[in-house]
Image (cartoon, rainbow, N blue to C red):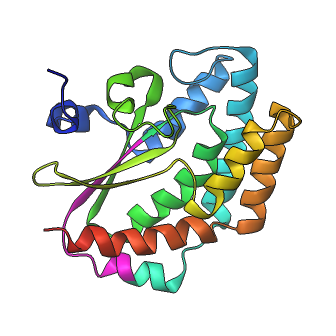
């Protein structure tokens, strides 16, 4: 019998998962060695990782949460774990994880934990997007029981359909797709991901 999500995401897994700062430090360490995170290694992925680290630093400094989202976060009562599957080479991770971390920092009720996708494929395969291991993937868990309350990812709902159209278009190269992707995030200024989480926090808070 296949293992369930609850069996795969155990207290030991949560304990071993990284904080946001630890994830950043791991990326920095990998870059200093000419590598990236996880088991997949190439010069191309290392360069993506270097660029993504710059994006994360910029968003750490410049992104701000909307007042309505901050209010919802500060009014939370239940303790949650936000477990995110990620990698340093992923552009969507770089664009989303900094603002997710800012949400977690706004309240003591959220414990943000990060797992590397390539080292946790058994968990990743429980949360596929259209059959693919797309990241970031956030799993919201009740802290007391590890009961799953919901998921988010790999992109803001407003953007996901358009991003996939670009990706599947044979006339759009991988480089052009990545450029379109990051231009969209730059124009959006984290508003779509914040809107997603405002709705989800209401849903997750209502599940007892």
- Residue drawn at (16%, 51%), measured in percent from left and top? 147
Residue at image coords 65%, 58%: 159
Q: Is residue 11 above or below residue 158?
A: above
Quarter of the N terminus within the rendering: top left
Q: What is the x, y in percent for residue 16?
A: 27, 31
Q: Nearer the viewer, residue 207 or 24?
A: 207
How many labels sit on residues?
0
In x, y percent, where is residue 41?
62, 14
Left of 179 or right of it: where is 62? left
Q: Which residues are magenta?
A: 72-84
Vertical side of 142 occupied by 6: above or below: above
Q: Position of residue 178 (x, y in %)?
A: 78, 41
Q: Residue at x 19, y 33 (%)?
A: 4
Magenta stretch: residue 58 in it?
no
* Location of residue 201 (image quadrant): bottom left
The image quadrant that residue 140 belongs to is bottom left
Q: Residue 6: x percent and y percent?
A: 17, 39
Nearest the camera: 185 or 65?
Answer: 185
Residue 192 sits in quarter = bottom right
Image quadrant containing the C terminus: bottom left
Judge whether residue 77 is colored magenta: yes
Q: Nearer the viewer, residue 31 or 45?
A: 45
Above/below status of 198 relative to 155: below
Residue 58 sits above or below residue 119 on the image: below
């Amino acid at each position: 019998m296949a293992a369930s999500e609850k069996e795969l995401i155990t207290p030991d897994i949560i304990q071993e998962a990284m904080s946001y700062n630890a994830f950043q430090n791991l990326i920095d360490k990998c870059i200093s060695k000419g590598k990236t995170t996880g088991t997949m290694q190439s010069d191309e992925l290392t360069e993506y990782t270097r660029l993504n680290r710059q994006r994360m630093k910029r968003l750490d400094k410049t992104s701000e949460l909307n007042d309505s989202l901050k209010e919802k976060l500060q009014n939370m009562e239940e303790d949650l774990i936000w477990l995110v599957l990620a990698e340093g080479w992923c552009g969507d991770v770089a664009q989303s994880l900094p603002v997710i971390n800012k949400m977690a920092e706004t309240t003591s009720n959220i414990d943000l934990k990060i797992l590397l996708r390539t080292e946790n494929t058994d968990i990743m395969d429980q949360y596929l997007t259209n059959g693919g291991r797309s990241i970031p993937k956030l799993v919201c868990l009740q802290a007391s029981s590890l009961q799953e309350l919901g998921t988010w990812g790999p992109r803001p709902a407003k953007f996901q359909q358009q991003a996939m159209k670009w990706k599947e278009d044979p006339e759009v190269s991988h480089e052009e797709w990545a450029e379109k992707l990051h231009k969209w995030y730059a124009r959006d200024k984290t508003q779509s991901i914040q809107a997603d989480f405002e709705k989800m926090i209401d849903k997750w808070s209502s599940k007892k």
